[in-house]
Image (cartoon, helix red, strand yellow):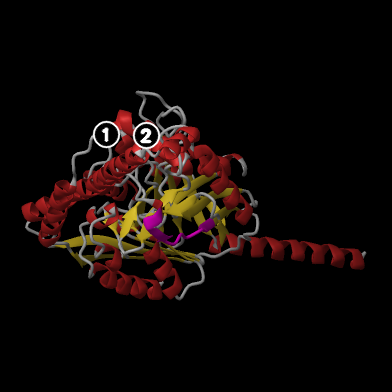
Amino acid sequence: MNRLSFKNILCVAMMLTSLLTANAALADALSAGVAKIDITHPNGLINDRSYVRALVIKNDETTVVIVSVDVVAIGEIGRIKNSYLGNVRTQIEKELGIKPQNMLFNASHCHSVICDNHEELTIKAIKQAAANMVPVTVGVGSGHEDRIQENRRLIMADGSEVDVRHAYSLPPDAEVAKVGPIDPEIGILRLNRADGRTLAVVYQFACHPIQGTPNGGNTADITGFSSQVIEENLDEATIALFLQGCGGDINPAHYKDVDYPRDAQPQGNLLGLSTLKALRKIECNTDNRIKVINEVIELPGANYSQRIARMEDEQLRLMNSLRGTTLNLKSFMPLAVKYKLSEKYPATHSFEYLQEDKIGKTGLKKLDSVNRNNIKQYMKNIYTMEQLTRVNTNLRLLKMHQAAMLKSGKRNVDVELVGLRIGDFVLLTFPGELTVQIGLNLKKASPHKKTFISGYTNGYIYYAPTAKQLLNPWGAQEDCDSLLAPEWQKVFETKSIEILGKL
């Protein structure tokens, strides 16, 4: 009887110890809640839905809000106004007591059209997430996807760069020497409930989600589809928040394809599946570390007066180089095909050339010489006009930003940088469209194993190219659709490395 009692006592003691250990682990665990609300504009053709997704995560000392929005930007361009960020932060601080500097708002940079009351719905999503907090474990990892992106900048044989855009034509193939880099890494933060079910996935990737859909309808594009794939293949009610990376010069693959309809879904499916593949390898553990560093810094702004003058000179030079030609498009097209099909006998059948040779005539050969010169001049005009479209488009951007700078009277640009650490997940954010090389630089310089760099966060200041890219003569939009002087990169990277070192 005594032996049985001892066994019973021992068993109870072991159960109590296990419960105490579990409770202690839960006490040390982070708490998190998530929510997702449809913000699709009700009018027009809708291909798929757009959402605002919110994650609230906290430990005993710090609460952080991460908001992912299926929209082009947080202010400045698109339907979200510049007042959005301040209004949402103010209301959430008032109602939930969360510090404004602890809230991150990232735009996927898709070009979806969202509803008018998106500000109200964003506040609602954050409040819903905060009302449904549960203990969570965290895990960090990364995936790989290199099939859906390409660097839009083409390095030409003369050292200049142009970019691949629908706004203007591609340069001749013979003038293209190489392409720029991509970043195929998918950064992943996994949050599991106490019972092991997935609560949320935060995943980060660098690519413009601007592929579109075959029907031309309103769409959240590549990253909308990838989030859908992730959410539908994990536990019920799991929410996937996409964070845009350094995608300033990264296009969807096959962006200029004219043989097939533009379709973001296959690319989104690939991104979603690659994220899921990496997710399966991530183990979640109790880790209650949260740290936020939020700093506003001043970056040197651009003065484009000299560049505008140079581009106007180039514009005039190109216009003056256009020459008249006897051909028009209707006569040029069949003539160009004929002279491409047969180098030796382009104008007519070979026997007629041979017959002329036999009787000592040269009419066809002289006709060929005239036609080839006319084709050459017409082609030269076409290439010149294509160059003009690039110059005209980029010159308009330079003049727009120069006028805004002069009107404001401000020569520098204030930006909000945020360094965030959740467990071993380290994120640095910036409000501009960072080009990919900057993200690669900071990842390499970071003291942390898993570091991810996101632009498009907490505001919008247009493109943020490298100093070298900003010195490119006139061929790429990133160089011209920017508020920053080349010196900005060193200031930004120095401060970013400092913040990363403190996390």
Evaluate whether residue 333 shows in this view: yes
User: Which of the 4 image quadrants contains residue 80?
Assistant: top left
Relative depth, front residue between 162 and 276: 162
Please, what secondary structure does the residue beneath circle 2 have?
helix
Query: What are the residue bounds of the magenta stretch?
Result: 174-189
- Give percent across and percent down for residue 120: 31, 36
Kind of residue indicated by mark 2: Leu
- Give percent across and percent down for residue 455: 35, 56
Check if mark 1's residue and mark 2's residue have beta carbons within 8 Å: yes
Which residue is label 2 attached to? 335
Give the answer, above or below, for where 301 lies relative to 328: below
Which residue is label 1 attached to? 327
Kind of residue indicated by mark 1: Leu
Relative depth, front residue between 484 and 237: 484
Q: Residues within 10 Å of mark 1 (few under 14, many from 20)?
A: some
Q: Is residue 180 magenta?
A: yes
- Give whichever of discs 1 and 2 has the lower sequence position: 1
Q: Residues within 10 Å of mark 2 (few under 14, many from 20)?
A: some
Q: Is residue 103 magenta?
A: no
| In this picture, residue 27 sits left or right of residue 380 | right
Give the answer, above or below, for where 473 lies relative to 498: above
- Give percent across and percent down for residue 238: 56, 44
Residue that appears at 70% across and 66% down:
17
Image quarter of the C terminus: bottom left
Tag of residue 205? none
Evaluate whether residue 37 shows in this view: no
| In this picture, residue 502 sits left or right of residue 168 | right
Relative depth, front residue between 90 and 297: 297
Residue that appears at 70% across and 63% down:
18
The CA span between labels 1 and 2 is: 9 Å
Image quarter of the N terminus: bottom right
Give the answer, above or below, for where 382 lies relative to 65: above
